[in-house]
Image (cartoon, coloured by chain):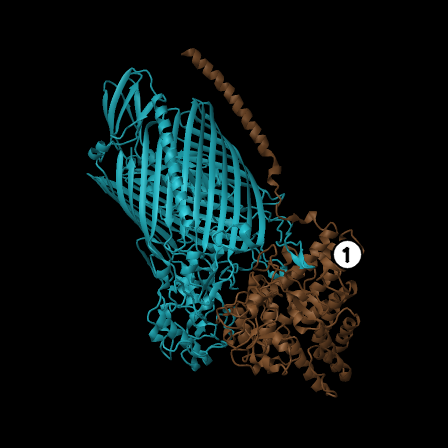
Chain colours: A brown, B cyan
Amino acid sequence: MKSPSYKFKKSKVMKFIKGLTLLALVLIAGCSDEILTKNSPNEVTAANFYKNSDDAVAAVNAAYDPLQYGGLFKNSYWSIGDIASDDAYKGDGGKSDGPAWWEFDLFDINSTNSLLADSWADSYTGIYRANIALKEIPNIDMDSNLQGRLIGEAKFLRGFYYFWLVRLFGDVPLITKPQKLGDLKVQRTAKSEVYNQIIKDMSEAASALPETYAGSNQGRITKGAANAMLAKVYMWQKNWDKAAEYSKKVIDSGVYELLDSYADNFKEEYENSKESVFEVQFMKGGPNGAWGNASDGTIQHISIAPRNSGVAGLEGWGFDMPTQDLVDEFESGDPRLETTVLMQGSTIQGGKQYDPAWSSTGYNTRKYLIKRDGFIGSGSDSPVNYRVMRYSEVLLNYAEALNEMGETSKAKQYVDQVRERVGLNELQAGLSQSEFREAVYHERRVELALEGHRWWDLVRTGRALEVMQDQPNGHGGQIQEHNLIFPIPQSEIDVNPDLSQNPGY
Amino acid sequence: MKRIKKVSRSLASIRLAIGMVLCLFIISGLTNSVNGQGNEVRVTGTVTDSLAGQTLIGVNVVVKGTNSGTVTNGDGEFALTVPNRNSVLVFSYVGYKSKEVTVGDKRDLNIQLTKDVGSLSEVVVVGYGTKRRADVTSSISSVSSDEIAEQTATNLNQAMQGRISGVNITQNSGAPGAGISVDVRGIGTIGNSSPLYVIDGIPGGDINSINPQNIESIEILKDASAAAIYGANGANGVVLVTTKGGSSGETMVNFDMTYGIQELSNKVDMLNAEQYARMQNEARSASGLQTYWDNPSSLGSGTDWQDALSRNAGVQKYNLSVSGGNEKLQYFISGGHYDQEGVLIGSGYNRSTIRVNADYRVSDFFKIGNKISLARTNQASIPEDYPFASDNRIVGALEMSPTVPVYRDGTFAGPQGDFEGSSQGPNPVGMATINDVDDESSNVSNRAYIEVNPLNNLTIRSEFGIDYTDGNYYEFQPTYRWGITSNAIAQLYRGSSNSFGWTSQTTVNYLDTFGEYHDVELLGGFSINESRYESIDASAQGFINEDVTVLSAADQINSLSEYAEEQSMIGYFGRVNYSYKNKYLFTGNVRVDGSSKFGEGHRYGTFPSFSLGWRASEEEFLSDVGFLSNLKFRFSWGKSGNSQIGNYNYATRLNLSQYYVLGGGIVPGVAPTSVPNEEVKWETTTQTNVGVDIGLFEDKVNLSADYYVKTTSDMLVPVPIPSSAGITEAPYQNAGKVENKGFELSLKYQDSVGDLSYNVGGNFSTAKNKVLSLGGGLPISSPILYRESVRLTRTQKGRSIGEFYGYKTNGLFQNQQDISNHATQPGAEPGDIRFVDVNDDGVINDDDRTYIGSPIPDFQYGFNAGVSYKNFDLKLLISGVYGNELMNTVGYRLLNGSHVGNKMAGVLDRWTGEGTSNSMPRLTWNDPNNNARISDRYVEDGSYLRLKNVQIGYNLPNSLLNKFGARKVRVYVSGRNLFTITDYNGFDPELGKVDNNNLNYGIDMGNYPVPRTFNVGLNIGF
């Protein structure tokens, strides 16, 4: 028995040594700190980016992206602009079906309204991305023409997002540099200061941007877009001289003209046309799906298509429902009514007839519907671009500004251009300044109907309270003075108590 | 078609499991036969229980000082040859005191073992080792395999529920296969407070793939001293799961089957069709709108959608295991299948598992072993946990108008217009039937070890674990047209994911006794872990033939995305155990951990701890106190860490898919979508624990009491950031401090009188939660839940985590005078809710919101009892919580006139004129007063007491068993969730966390109710 025991011990020692060696090996492997350094496989780190012109372009593209978000042109822009006004009701489905839209219809607007919360968040996303681009691009060694153009685009976008915010909320935090985690809590800045920044950004953009783009760059901000938007900002300031000056620049550029057919403005086939001054781009089937901010299509079609049609390709929620009041505004024989509103007698998909029973007003919104017959695809992912600024608006802006400057007779031809295109008579000659003003207001309402302009025109021209109070209760009649600006989202105040709420909310 | 496929697939997996087990059974027979040894003295005998007298099966009989031994057979008999007459036999059996007998002249031994009621000799699994219960100085709770077997539990966490003091376990949903929230000693952090799971010694792994019947024991390390050896992520407690192993001796075969029927345990009281129409008319009239229904009384009672969506659903479970071995090889092999239909149409869950655990002693100083588990789960689910009827079948069934029939014209019926609540979504029964959601997961988990004993008291152990999970998601939404609701284009969502993790750990353990009284154990080790997760998701639409639902058959691919993440961790740890005279006990731990989740300079954290114990009952001055069998005082202090946050928080990352469209095509946009927090570091929990263990009357009575104070500092919180930052994803920050204090008590009593033996046990625990500070000083609001832009909870210094936040109500305005006397409340009319002007500024607005309830219970409790008489036994388990509030957001939808869908029957008691009601407001379509806003109306008492489990069993007598040659045959009936006592108005008061977020705890989003189940079962052993 002794000898095996001795062997046993010997092999035991051997194994022990082997065991220790194994242990040591694993320990050495384990000591390596490299294993603790992990980079995200999905994303690029800041240190490896903003190095060349491709990076610069991608940074600016990201600042365009929020234009497609719910808080801008996918949803809020036209929802608020139309439903808050006398042009449209929220539509059927009761208060719990889209309470945020409903609140604008009722003028019972709460600080929890999701259209407002989205508008706030999405605009600031755009501003943040423009701020990053403006910080990083000047440091990139690249073609200086392209560099200047990209900076111009970013400035315009920043100004544009602020213009949306300042009209919705009044004073808003003015942030012009990317923030760090420690300094995210900011206070509101006076509206006038925000406007100064908008004008500065848009002016600088206008001088840096080209008149047109070719091919794959189509859809970027042009000089004309910057000038036209700047004119509009000046109109909000009642700075008529400047509004006229910048509108005139657009007209004189020779880049833009009215399309022969008014209806073509809202079709997919006529995107980025010669009438379109600023257009937000959408397409269906983008890589981020059919729903949500990340999607590259718009939900406008499914939102406005009749609720109960049962017609393939024309089914939706029936929101943004045109009012009788709007329909009555059109002069008889104005072909724009047929383009704007689905009504008794409208021919729809597949040659079928629209049935007024699909809507409680008897009307549905027609602009921006996907029009192709036999359309198949998710209505939530509509490819139709949003025309933010059409040349006809530039003409009307110029006419309005000239009239306010006392140059009524000079202004007339620009309104007439808009009327002639749709086969209507010229305005009567010799209108007084105030008569002409009413004529421009009327022309704006019908020319730009259901394109998200009406509420803002009412507010800008000081008519919102008077006009809306005449609306039925439940559709704006209970408007109060404080409703001319909207509540700061409560979810925002909850995390940043330095923000004050607007009075009345 | 799909259903049939699934059934045949599960049949195949049963066959496979049975086949495999049988195969191994044969192999094990072979290993048994190579067991012979030379013989000098042959002894035989029988082992019985000292009290009840029944024979004990599977008792280990070992010749002391050798490795030779056997186990008792089905009749409690053993036969063994021993070297000589002086040999000592050691009889040991789980739950009994070991006994040593010298063979002497006896050749036929009758051995009686005494139940070790105090289980002081019970071995407890601790981090990186085991310990006798008597030596434990920290706070550790255990659940044994017997206790698991009593329950017909679906998963690990269900098996623990109600058993353990200080551990709050709530099912997030009653849906088959749904997740569970586990909080050890209160909610330790606003971030992720889930405990660390350690499966067979390796942290991590998929707990859902574990078959509860394969579990030998579950230990919960509650205090810092116990958990600190897992420093990293030990802060929220550690759950150690140990699966069964074999033991040397006769091969044992066990077969279990259970069949059960489940039913909906509760229904929400809703309006019938006639009442619905009347209430809707009233609401519309109140807002000056045309009414929808001319003749409500003609509608009758209509459809009960809860009945329509629910069913009596079957649940079945099969398990076959074989275990055994000899001195060299021990094995445990098991195959199991579990199949549960959901009580709501369209839901179900099944799981097939195979496990092979084996240990092989190569030589006296060298041992290897491996545990491998293969599991496949398949969950068919219906959408829940979402506040909108169109996206939540449960809310859908509540809100669907009772005027709509389930079927019409040979297909599902749908609402025919707004008046039938078309905006509330389509027919929920139809949706649950035609929409198909299958979430499959396949899991391989392997644990291998090598153990070397170069010296008798030195053990080196290297372990290597891998966990691989492969996920496969399929969701198809076919086209339909029911009434005016329709889906014109079929949608398909597919996801494929996998996660792979490996862990390597090595420990060196040295054990020695110095002098007569000093016992020392030293442990040192390190561990390294790395894991990667990746997924590919796609969605598509439009299918020519809806029987062929593959991506390649779709008209259009809508989205395609890939995602991946990686993480790693390194840990070094050491432990000293010292005991003097077995009376004075000390344990010290330290662990240093590094995590890839933090940036350079913040990666490492150090977590020390110690504990002290005094076994006073071993002192001479207490030796006269006859009734006192055990008295131990415990004290512990320690720090442990938590790093359960997303990866890459510290890095500035740019997202590449912020696309825009230019020139008619997609162009890439690159921007940060998160704010980096470069300074983010470990969250640290410091815990102090004092405890006492008392055993009385030979440990017939056992009592444990603990008091702890647990403070979490540098709490990892995704502090919501203003969206003016341009980013909505909040980064984790080390913001604030939370304290949990609590008292825990558990009590066991067991005794027997003649053939009757019985035991009762109970546990009680409190956890008082208080936020001591918050980083910026600002309250933290909960994330917005889906589309309602409302934050339901708020967390503020001086209060507990996640308290509900909203308006306070004070009855209803009875008349115009009431309104004028009250603070300005825009839109109010008689019959509307009077909201309290909390800040007393004369106006009711958002500034009047305040704290209106807490989801954290004052205390929780469990009670269990067992009685056995001869061959019959009865076991029951009750659990409950007290003093918590729940936010019934379903009520937010179902109690208001502005809501188009059906309403709760409570609205029948609405205000209809002065003095008619002071709680249920008038019904109004436009709701100008915003009665619907989040207020204490929806906050309800969440206390409940639930009979979790009852089981009555019968064991066939030995006389009968011998005829079959069986070792054991047991039949039983059991019931789960037989009754619940509660005042809560929703489906079920047991509510976990939405998205596993502590800020969204106790919120009823329309959760799948926990069903009531009746089971019959059979258990056969050979």
* Closer-to-camera residue (B735/B383): B383
Identify the residue shown where x is 44% and y is 79%. Answer: B290
Tell me how many marks there are. Answer: 1
Left or right of residue B373, residue B504 in this image: right
Locate residue B659: give its quadrant. Answer: bottom right
**Of helix, strand and loop, which one carries label 1?**
helix
Residue B746 spot, x, y in % from top left:
34, 46
- Can you see residue B721? yes
Q: Which residue is mark 1?
A: A147
Q: Chain of mark 1?
A: A
Residue B139 x %, y %: 41, 42
Position of residue B515 relative to residue B905, above or below, is above
Near mark 1 (Cα within 10 A), the count class, few <14, some 14-19 or many ≥20, is: many
Q: Nearer the viewer, residue A307 or B248?
A: A307
Residue at the farthest front position: A351
Q: In which quadrant of the rendered image does the C terminus of chain A lie?
A: bottom right
Look at label 1 and name its amino acid: Gln
> In the figure, residue B596 lies in which quadrant?
top right
Task: From the top left corner, tell me how far across and down residue A62 is, in percent.
Answer: 67, 57
Q: Point out residue A16 in the picture as x, y percentages from the top left corner.
A: 51, 22
Depth order, front residue of B736/B876: B876
**The N terminus of chain A, quarter of image:** top left
Q: Is residue B714 visible?
A: no
Is A119 on the left or on the right of A415, as rendered? left
